[in-house]
Amino acid sequence: MRTPWPLRPAPTPGLAESAAYLARASSPPPAVTRALGELLATRFASAGASPSGSSASAAFDALLHAGRTALDCGQPALALELADSALGRRRASRAAWRLRAGALEALGRATQAVEAYERHRALTPRGDPAAAYTALLERRRLLLEAAELAPGSAFAAAVHEELPPEEVHAAFTDRLTAALREHGAAVPEVRRLARLYAAYRLIVAHGRMADPALAGTAPLSAGDLRNRLAGRPVALVAPGGPTPPEDGSLVLRCGSFRADERADGHVTTVAAGTKCLDRPVAYRIILGEDLTAWREALRTAVPGAQRYLGDESLRRPLTDPALLAGGAPAAPAVTMALLLDFLDATPHVRLYGSERLTAADRDRLKETRTVLR
């Protein structure tokens, strides 16, 4: 029997999606165009040759690369189409499920994103949890709880309709601002909404440290801090404050301190420069308003002088209306006191050296559970 020639190559996954996108996009990002071009090239590279495992693998890899590039360049709809095309070929591909989950999350389709993350986790060896999956679940829980406090509002509708994240964020901010203006911060429901907003914003700002290569140092997010402080009392010590008693509290030194003073953690600022950065602690947090200056400050941290270094979620935690810290930036000790109060993980927080605080900073702590010493 005569064999037809040339052999028809197997359809390249993602070919139709790529062609359709390029046809309709008026000015696609250059990186996306290049990635799709590489994907289309695999179709023609295999033309006239019998299908092989290597060519199929190359096409699949190009498909995933194009999908990840599309997601990184703000094209989640295209990324989702390419992820689905990949899953049509390899249903058990962890990378494809991860791509689908990220695309769905970027589109605001949280329920489907959770399902995709679940499939990714089920296919991951030893069941290692995905950090993005965990953050998505927690963010979704906070949004649903907050929506219950605002029935019938535009914010609640945005949450339940799973609108894009930026629209949900804007609606949440507008709702909290309106609640504070109409009812004030003394109303329990408003304070609860503010706490949920603060926790939500801390999870959204989940960026990691700019230079993770510091030897012996791991990044510390706001969620990590909450988990590590859960159930443990905290003693915050302002510069020049008295030594707290040995009562099992975790001691966080805010600002400069002497080498012979006990410190489990150190909270400093970009403006403080390298003061005390060489003193060994378990936790170190550097506060800063300017992102570029903060990233440079991270690089001044001494390798081995801390086990955990605060990431971007701890860079400037008092910028949201939920934290009611208007005016000039709060002192580091006050910043941490407000943050710990909103994280609500410790049985009590004592601030030593409070007599050195400004009147404005003392006012900021009036509605918290912080005990001033």
Image (tube, helix red, strand yellow):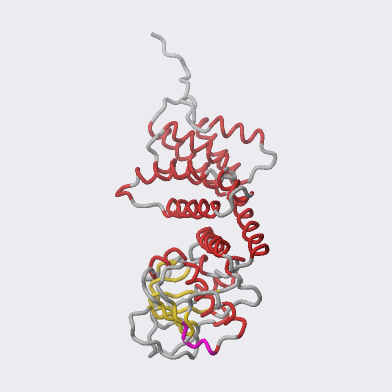
Residue at 49% x, 91% y: name it.
240
Residue at 31% x, 47% y: name it.
125
Provide the residue span drawn in magenta. Answer: 351-355
Q: Nearer the viewer, residue 357 or 109?
A: 357
Q: Nearer the viewer, residue 134 or 2?
A: 134
Residue 146 colored in magenta in the image: no
Instruction: Name, please, the residue furthest toward the left.
Output: 126
Residue 354 colored in magenta in the image: yes
Residue at 64% x, 77% y: name it.
328
In the image, is residue 197 above or below residue 15? Answer: below
Report the number of numbered marks: 0
The spot of residue 324 in percent (x, y) is 60, 70
Whether residue 331 appears in this view of the structure is: yes
- Please give left or right for residue 229 compared with residue 369 in the image: left
Q: Nearer the viewer, residue 177 or 265?
A: 177
The spot of residue 222 in percent (x, y) is 47, 66
